[in-house]
Structure formats: C-alpha cells, structure tokens
Amino acid sequence: MKNLFEQFMSLHGFVRLLIVLAATFVISLLVKLLFGVKFKKHRTTTIFGMIGSILIFLIWFAGIVYALMQIGVDTTSILVGAGITGIILGLGSESLIADVLAGISLILDKDFQVGDTVAIDDFRGEVVAMGMRTVSIRDIAGNVNIIRNSTIESVINQSKGTPLTVARFPVSRDERLEDVEEMVEKAIDTV
C-alpha cells in the first residue's frame, strides 16, 4: 500500500488532480446509489435522501479541495474563505435556515411523509418529495406545487385515519325499503 501511495505522489499534479476528481465522482455515484434506494416506509426514503444529499455535497467539497492540493494550490485560504463565506451566508439567509429547520422538524414530527395525501393552504395532493428546504405536492391533474418548509403553517393529512366517502342518489317516497337497500349496496360496491 505504501508503494502505491508513493507512485501516486510521484505522478504530475494535473494527473493526480484528474485521478482525485474521478475518484470523487465514483464515490458520489456510489453514495447516490446507496442512499437513493426506495424503501417501503416513505419516511426512511426521505431521511436517506437527505443524508445522501449532504454526503454528496461534503464528498465533492473535500474532493475538490484535495484535487486543488495536488496541483499546488494553497487550500488553507480556500478553507478560511469558505468558513467566512459560510458565516456571511448564514447571517444573510435567514429564510434558508428557517426552511432547513422547518424541514427537519417536519420529518422528525412525522406529521406527513412521501406518499401521503395532504392539503396545505389551498393546494391538495400527494406528497412526492420532502427535502431540507421544500415539500413537493402533486395534485390529481399532475401539477406539482413546491412549497417552502418555513411557510407551512397547517397541514391536513388525509392519509391518516378512516377516509369518508359520500354517495348521494335520489330516492322517491314511494320506493320500497328493500329496493332502497339494494341501491345502497350497489352504490357501496361502485364506490
């Protein structure tokens, strides 16, 4: 193993940069495959997706910094600059932080999850994705509404509990009770 490391270090910086970027790409693909698996429980799929996104970001950041080190770039200033930029962005992006904290709260509270039918504000549909910043809901016509997590104040989850179905049909006063019961049975079978 030491011999392999010495051979790697003896390569020219640009070749090492390409090798590091290729390795970063492969590792990020493996993480996408691992964390992109669909589970029976939608909540598990959502949490795995969020963890996968964070890991992919960290892998690419570390890979790029290490690749730059291979061609002789002083990465100390980049890391310090990233830290300062992070602080500035953190202070300047209150809505982003509010969205992320609300997203974590939504997932941990289990109020709704991917696959549930919900009503948020005046939009009703199936939750197709839950992320750190947004929730995506598809209505019956196929329209997808993307809602920022921090703007969600109340949710009606129509997937929890027993659904109610109403079937209305006209019955005259002259109908026999047996005929009405038969009509109700047919309506129940239809519904």
Image (cartoon, rainbow, N blue to C red):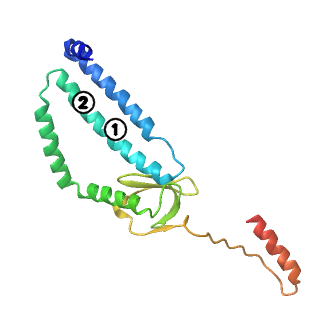
Query: Percent x, y for residue 131?
Result: 39, 51
Q: Is residue 107 left or right of 179 when viewed as pictured?
A: left
Q: Residue 62 or 133: which is nearer the viewer?
A: 62
Q: Quadrant of the N terminus?
A: top left
| Residue type indicated by callout 1 | Ile
**Residue displayed at 36% across by 45% down:** 51
Residue 123: image tag:
none
**Residue displayed at 88% across by 78% down:** 179
Q: Is residue 91 left or right of 175 when viewed as pictured?
A: left
Q: How far apart are marks 2 and 1 (CA)?
A: 12 Å
| Residue type indicated by callout 2 | Ile
Q: Is residue 191 left or right of 109 when viewed as pictured?
A: right
First along the sequence among labels 2 and 1: 1
Query: Percent x, y for residue 30?
Result: 41, 32
User: Is disc 2 in contact with disc 1, using a CB cutoff of under 8 Å?
Assistant: no
Residue 56: image tag:
1
Q: Is residue 43 left or right of 54 when viewed as pictured?
A: right
- The crowd level at tag 1 (other Cα within 10 Å; few <14, some 14-19, many 20+) is many
Residue 64: image tag:
2
Q: Residue 107 or 175: which is nearer the viewer?
A: 107
State the image quarter where residue 71 is shown. Answer: top left
Query: Percent x, y for residue 56?
Result: 34, 38
Question: Against 118, is 138 above or below?
Answer: above
**Residue displayed at 51% across by 47% down:** 39
